[in-house]
Amino acid sequence: MAKALLDVLTGKAPERRPVWLMRQAGRYLPEYRAVRQEAGSFLDLCYRPDLAAEVTLQPLRRYDFDAAIVFADILVVPHALGLDLKFVENEGPVLSTVRDMAGVDALGTERGPWQYERVYETLRGVKAGLPGHVGLIGFCGAPWTVASYMIEGRGSNRALALAAAQANEMWFRSLMQRLVESSVEYLLGQVAAGAEALQIFDSWAGDLPGELRQRCVHEPIAAIVRGVREVRPEIPFIVFGRGIGMGHAELARATGANAVSVEQDVALSDVLASLPEGVAVQGNLAPEIVMGGGVSLAQGAREICRSVPMDRHVFNLGHGILQHTPPENVTELLKVIREHDGGKT
């Protein structure tokens, strides 16, 4: 079987509708929780290639997904640039901060830092264990989202980051440029290690309106896409600009994305109708519906499949799968999708 994910992303007719789920390797799976306990911490799990490859592959053993996404974190890049990073239970990531030019100048310049190399090793391990029809996705965080974490030191409140973006001082511009350059290096390394498609996550894109979104979201992501394609022009990109509503068409045009991933409160059909020819949509069933299961899951999945054609759609969620989702609900989701599309396997 051909790789349905890559077919959709490159404008070919897929044999079936490709399906994968954000956070498909995660805490809803008991086998993941066992490995997470063995690793000791989330960050240790990210940097243990044997264990990170194992949890990446776990959902592929349970479910007939069409893609695996490497298990890592968007904060690998600032960690590789020299910031202290830890994950606090029930709080999330905590970083040392960058808030002036001295902080930007202090960021590391080492090529191929050990953090990147661990992720590359994970990708090589995953690649060796994947079924032939399953695509392998690498990823990074978008500069705006990553810069927000670096400026704030955590992810909950972005007041300082928004003020820096609005002021557009030299240090902020320099920080964004450093993140573009480091992300290009990191993604090219992922491709060399086996990634066949790349996703850029801009979790806080919806914070920025108008000119700020163009300057801090569109332009940096476009620069990353160009930088990778200068070396590997064949690599397709998915861009997830969370919270931008009907701004996905503008995002696609500005960045050259092959697909845009869409949050759950926007109609996929409306977004698809607004996109440049050949650009696909990814999404966008609400994670809460998958967690609840039952009739709502079946109705929601069928409605999405009816609303957008198979050759322009990657089935996914509007955001990551929730921790308390029963694993059997994902089995049911896949059954509904395959039955709707004619029972192709």
Image (cartoon, rainbow, N blue to C red):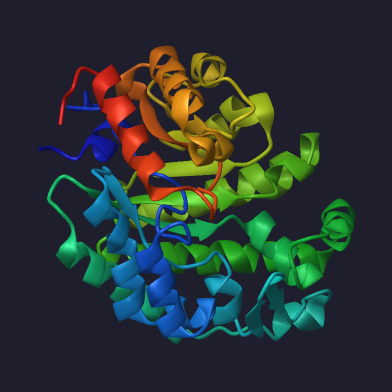
Residue 47 appearing in the image: no
Q: Which residue corresponds to the image point at 61% horizontal and 51% vertical from the top-left?
A: 220
Q: Nearer the viewer, residue 282 or 330?
A: 330
User: Which residue occupies the foreground of this view, 111 or 33?
Assistant: 33
What is the x, y in percent for residue 91? 72, 70
Q: Look at the picture and state if 216 lies above or below 139.
A: above
Where's residue 257, x and y in %?
A: 46, 38
Q: Which of the 4 quarters of the picture holds residue 206?
A: top right
Answer with left or right where residue 124 lies relative to residue 184.
left
Total number of numbered labels? 0
The answer to whether residue 242 is left or right of residue 336 is right
Q: Position of residue 200 (x, y in %)?
A: 51, 51
In this view, 202 is above or below 37: above
In-image side of 96 versus 130 (left or right):
right
Quarter containing the N terminus: top left
Q: Is residue 270 left or right of residue 236?
A: right
Q: Residue at x 14, y 53 (%)?
A: 131
Look at 37% across and 62% down and name the residue there: 70
Q: Quadrant of residue 163?
A: bottom right
Where in the figure is residue 33, as x and y percent of width and height? 43, 70
- The residue lying at 31 percent from left, 55 percent from top is 59
Viewer can see residue 326: yes
Give the residue furthest to the front: 294
Quadrant occupied by the C terminus = top left
**Along the line of sight, the residue nearer the viewer: 171 or 237:** 237
